[in-house]
Image: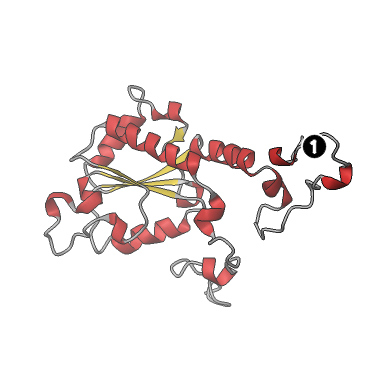
Amino acid sequence: MDVTPAEAAAAPGASAQDLPDPTRLPATGGRLGALARLAPEPMKVVLNWGRRYSLWVFNFGLACCAIEFIAASMARHDFIRLGVIPFAPGPRQADLMLVSGTVTDKMAPAVKRLHEQMPEPKYVISFGACSNCGGPYWDSYSVTKGVDQIIPVDVYVPGCPPRPEALLQGIIKLQEKIAEESLRDRYRAPGGPRPSAAQLQSDLVRPPAPGEGSR
């Protein structure tokens, strides 16, 4: 593969010493190493292609919107053809959390805990008016005014409840977002230091203390 920049093409009469060495690239400190610096776009395309068409969904169903999710996963709409696999065994095996229904303040810690247990990269779709902003129960003292107050949301699907076609459109929007994203920009500031293990560790999911699990 020729990795010489186009502007550095050999001019008539130029010697080999005048041409830049394509292997002498400036160190960027990236986590993907030299291969990412030599061919960043093809690698990004391959990784994002694999992620967008192999989304394991963890459905956090809380109300009637969860029924529409089940309808969208059945044979009539069949979102498996889009590369989305429903009913992941748990959050640790899921790439996409779909929050559907009314989130209460008492339920909020459980939503955050499950989101923390998902491996990176992870995505969230807020499905329905109740999950987006509280819906018809927004003025209740016990209702959280949108799941985005607890966890980051990538795509909002409006409706009360939304039809299965709306969920399919939301999945396609998420796949378009995944196709354009760069994991280096998402998880690390340009030129910034690599996050430590303590920074990546969740405050909710902690290992047991010595002797705690032996009781």
| x 60%, y 65%: residue | 194
The outermost residue toward the top is: 76
Q: Is residue 199 left or right of residue 68?
A: right
Residue 12: x and y in percent read: 82, 34
Q: Is residue 88 above or below residue 190?
A: above
Q: Is residue 148 above or below residue 86?
A: below
Q: Is residue 109 left or right of residue 194?
A: left
Q: Is residue 189 above or below residue 15?
A: below
165 or 18: nearer the viewer: 18
68 or 190: nearer the viewer: 190
The outermost residue toward the front is: 13
198 or 207: nearer the viewer: 198
Q: In what element is the residue under mark 1?
A: loop
Q: Is residue 169 above or below residue 139?
A: above
Residue 32: x and y in percent read: 66, 52
211 or 202: nearer the viewer: 202
| x 68%, y 49%: residue | 37
Query: Which residue position holds label 1?
Result: 10
Residue 93: x and y in percent read: 50, 47
Answer few, some or many: residues within 10 Å of disc 1's Cα (few below 14, many 20 plus, some between 14 and 19): some
